Amino acid sequence: MDNLLIERFTLLVDKHSGGKHTHFAKLAGIPTSTFQCYMQGRSPHADHLLRIRETYNVNTDWLLSGEGPIYIDRAGKEGESSPADADPEVAALLEGARRVLKSGNPIAFDALERNIRYFDHAVATEQRLEQTESKMENMSRELAEIKSFLSEHRKCETITDEEQLEKKAI
């Protein structure tokens, strides 16, 4: 294996895992000791290259030869950026979910579907709760302003009433 492949691996590890080889390998489903061997010059297995491609949307042509764009999208179009750039852990989870959904195992499919729907509902409910809390805080501030205004207005009325009593007494 050439040093340029090691450099390309290093670039990916730095970009996707902050320079942590073990994190990069784990997300791609590659044994960390095996990936460390790749970083030291051992030629990578084809299935590991495919895992890197699937996890990080890396163009394997670029990885092996340095030619072409670094990334490909799910539709197969080549490009310089990748949805996995933002969070490779999310990409790994989505890939795992895709494997479960395509596995043909109805129990696994049903369990994953129920969990996704449950947590999606929980997140949506939490967002609605946060919005409601924000609205309540705004209403509370407005109520405090109204109370303050009424309190000041009542003080003015009391002073006016006292002045009128003084005028009548004179």
Image: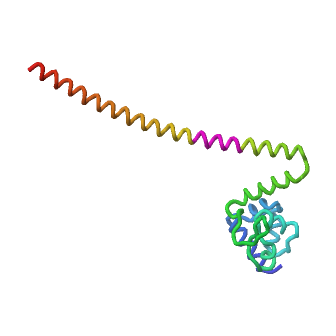
Residue 72 highlighted magenta (yes or no)? no
For the residue pair 62 and 18, the one nearer the viewer reads as 62
- Asked where in the image residue 98 lies, by quadrant, the reply is bottom right
Where on the picture, by quarter, is residue 149?
top left
**Residue 81: x percent and y percent?**
69, 69
Rendering coords of residue 10 (x, y %): 73, 72
In which quadrant will I find the C terminus?
Answer: top left
Position above or below: 155 against 123: above
> Which residue is painted at 45% across and 35% down in the image?
140
Residue at position x 33%, y 31% from top? 150
Total labels: the figure holds 0
Question: Which residue is pictured at 42% across the width and 37% down the height?
Answer: 142
Q: Dividing the image into 4 quarters, which one contains the N terminus?
A: bottom right
* In the image, farthest residue toward the top: 169
Q: Give the color scheme: rainbow, by chain, secondary structure or one colour.
A: rainbow
Prevalent SS, magenta region: helix
- Asked whether 123 falls inside the magenta stretch, the response is yes
- Point out residue 8 in the picture as x, y percentages from the top left corner: 74, 75
Q: In this view, does 159 lie above or below 46?
A: above
Of 37 and 7, nearer the camera is: 7
Looking at the picture, does residue 8 appear above or below residue 131? below
Picture coordinates of residue 160 (x, y %)? 20, 27
The span shown in magenta is: 120-130
In this orientation, which residue lies closer to the viewer: 21 or 148?
148
Quarter where residue 21 is shown: bottom right
**For this view, does 148 lie left or right of residue 23?**
left
Does 125 sit left or right of 109 as displayed?
left
The residue at 81%/52% (across/down) is 97
Q: Residue furthest right?
A: 104
